[in-house]
Amino acid sequence: MKAFVLCRLTAGLEQKALNQIRSIQGVNDVYLTFGHWDAVLAAEADTIDKLSALIVREIRGIHGVQSTETLVTTGL
């Protein structure tokens, strides 16, 4: 399963949070953005359950990640 994860980060903690996000296995790319979201992550896991765990436990568990929204791709 592949997904794009939109992330809102806490002001002043962005760089530390991004460094931790980049080290997570399953996060393939990190794109910095301007606007409502601070970063867009390209993530991948074998199943939807593993993808959910990656996002909920690992990404959202990082100090400095305020919120996320996940866009699961169909792979077309």
Image: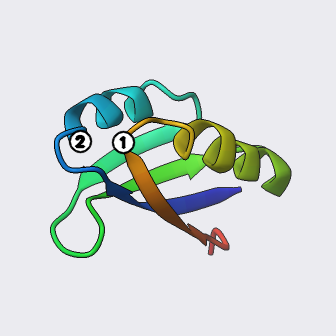
Camera-side residue: 44 or 22? 22
* Within-10-Å neighbours for mark 2: few <14, some 14–19, many 20+: some
Return the x and y of residue 34 as percentages of the image width and height. Answer: 15, 67
How many discs mark residues in the rendered view? 2
- The answer to whether 53 appears left or right of 8 in the picture is right
Return the x and y of residue 11 as percentages of the image width and height. Answer: 19, 50
CB atoms at circles 1 and 2 under 8 Å apart? yes
Kind of residue sitting beneath label 1: Gly
Camera-side residue: 19 or 46? 19
Nearer-N-terminus badge (1/2): 2
Kind of residue sitting beneath label 2: Glu
Find the distance from the CA under tag 1 to the CA under tag 2.
7 Å
- The answer to whether 54 appears left or right of 4 in the picture is right
Give the colour scheme of this rendering. rainbow
Residue drawn 34% across the image and 46% down it: 30
Where is mark 2, residue-wise?
A: 14
Query: What secondary structure is marked by label 1?
Result: loop
Return the x and y of residue 72 as percentages of the image width and height. Answer: 63, 69
Residue drawn 60% across the image and 36% down it: 58
Residue drawn 26% across the image and 60% down it: 38
Where is mark 1, residue-wise?
A: 64
